[in-house]
Image (cartoon, grey):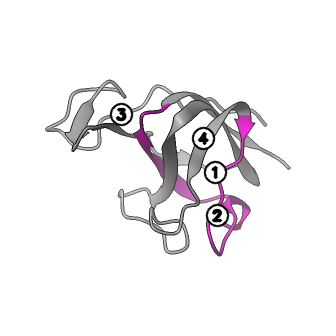
């Protein structure tokens, strides 16, 4: 199963639409974006991203936008120094397959990184 999850939606009504919303935190460029709600129909996520001198973390939220325990930003393993088309995000204690069939959203937090695409895989 291949599902493109982009374009992204703003985190809340006060932000501009899409992932072009940039925030400055110190000297780093930090970008945050959230997908629209979708039913997770697969076992894993693959990310096409470039963060050769930065970092990206992915948080899985419920349909209402609240972090799901086990998939919070703090539990996300950073994709740092990576550049690839099939990067697989990981969390410390759970895998996305445990959420199969649930309506979720993904929140991407990128620091000096670029996100090109995301897909849900059956494997």
- Region in magenta: 86-113
Give the spatial CA distance, label 1 vs label 2: 7 Å
Magenta residue check for 123: no
Answer whether labels 1 and 4 touch (C-beta < 8 Å): no
Residue, disc 4? 81
- For image coordinates 48% across by 32% down, the residue present is 113
Where does the image place residue 4, in percent across and percent down from the top left? 62, 29
Camera-side residue of 46 and 41: 46
Mark 2 or mark 3, which has the lower sequence index? 3
Residue 79 in the image: above or below residue 1 = below
Q: Secondary structure at mark 1?
A: loop
Residue, disc 2? 99
Quarter in which the N terminus is drawn: top right
Residue, disc 1? 40
Residue, disc 3? 9
Answer whether labels 1 and 2 touch (C-beta < 8 Å): yes
- For image coordinates 41% across by 40% down, the residue present is 111
Q: Secondary structure at mark 4?
A: strand
Give the spatial CA distance, label 4 vs label 2: 28 Å
Magenta residue check for 112: yes
Give the spatial CA distance, label 1 vs label 3: 17 Å
Q: Secondary structure at mark 3?
A: loop
């Amino acid at each position: 199963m291949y599902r493109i999850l982009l374009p992204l939606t703003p985190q809340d009504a006060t932000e501009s639409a899409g992932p072009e919303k940039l925030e400055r935190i110190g000297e780093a460029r930090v970008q945050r974006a959230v997908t629209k709600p979708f039913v997770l129909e697969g076992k894993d996520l693959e990310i096409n991203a470039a963060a050769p001198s930065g970092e990206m973390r992915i948080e899985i939220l419920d349909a209402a936008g609240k972090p799901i325990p086990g998939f919070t930003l703090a539990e996300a393993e950073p994709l740092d120094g990576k550049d690839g088309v099939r990067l697989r995000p990981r969390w410390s204690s759970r895998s996305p397959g445990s959420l199969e069939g649930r309506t979720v959203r993904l929140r991407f937090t990128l620091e000096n990184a670029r996100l090109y695409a995301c897909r849900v895989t059956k494997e």
